[in-house]
Amino acid sequence: MAIVRTNKKTTAARFKMIEWIYTNLPFLCFVCALILMYIANAHQAEKKVRKIQALKKEVKELNWQYREVKNDIMYGSTPSKVAEKVSAMDLKVSNVAPKKIKTKRESQKSDGSEK
């Protein structure tokens, strides 16, 4: 069997250390809680930054889609494209200029005699 030697100085020092830990236990718990809150806050901040970056990317893609659709609509509404689309319905562009119909009020205003 092994002989266990106990030194009074080391034993007393151990007890003082344990006593110090127990007396400062509330402070140590408080420090641990602060550390946990700091870590949680850092994780939440990183999560929000990632979400913001994803939303920026989505906005950029939607902006490109908007511009593409807008350009398609603008290109499709040109007179030549409209003429191509309605040619299947046997409609044609008239070569005669439209005539303006004047009412009595408009003709009086143009003559300068107002009532």
Image: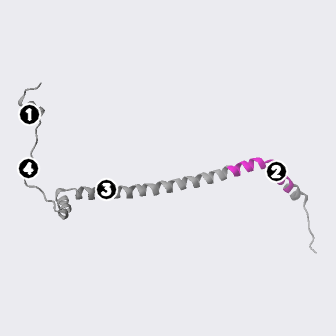
Query: Is 38 displayed left or right of 61 in the figure?
Result: right
The residue where tag 4 is placed is: 97
Q: Mark 1 or mark 3, which is nearer the start of the sequence?
A: 3
Q: Mark 2 or mark 1, which is nearer the start of the sequence?
A: 2
Residue 27 in the magenta stretch? The answer is yes
Question: Considering depth in this image, is 50 or 31 the residue closer to the camera?
Answer: 50
Do labels 1 and 2 touch, CB within 8 Å? no
Question: Considering depth in this image, is 27 or 113 the residue closer to the camera?
Answer: 113
Gap in angstroms between the C-alphas marked 1 and 4: 20 Å
* Image quadrant where residue 69 sits: bottom left
Query: In the image, what residue type sits under mark 4?
Result: Ala
Q: Is residue 69 above or below residue 24?
A: below
The residue where tag 2 is placed is: 22
Q: Is residue 87 above or below residue 41?
A: below
Q: Nearer the viewer, mark 1 or mark 4?
A: 1
Task: Report the magenta residues as a range.
Answer: 14-33
> Where residue 82 sits: x, y (%)?
19, 58
Residue 50 in the magenta stretch? The answer is no
Q: Mark 4 or mark 3, which is nearer the start of the sequence?
A: 3
The residue where tag 1 is placed is: 107
Q: Secondary structure at mark 4?
A: loop
The residue where tag 3 is placed is: 67
Q: Mark 4 or mark 2, which is nearer the start of the sequence?
A: 2
Query: Is 2 displayed left or right of 85 in the figure?
Result: right
Do labels 2 and 3 touch, CB within 8 Å? no
Query: In the image, what residue type sits under mark 2?
Result: Tyr
Gap in angstroms between the C-alphas marked 3 and 4: 35 Å
Residue drawn at (69%, 50%), measured in percent from left and top? 33
Q: Which quadrant does the N terminus fall into?
A: bottom right
Gap in angstroms between the C-alphas marked 2 and 4: 101 Å
Query: Is 8 displayed left or right of 105 in the figure?
Result: right
Q: Which circle marks residue 115 in the picture?
A: none
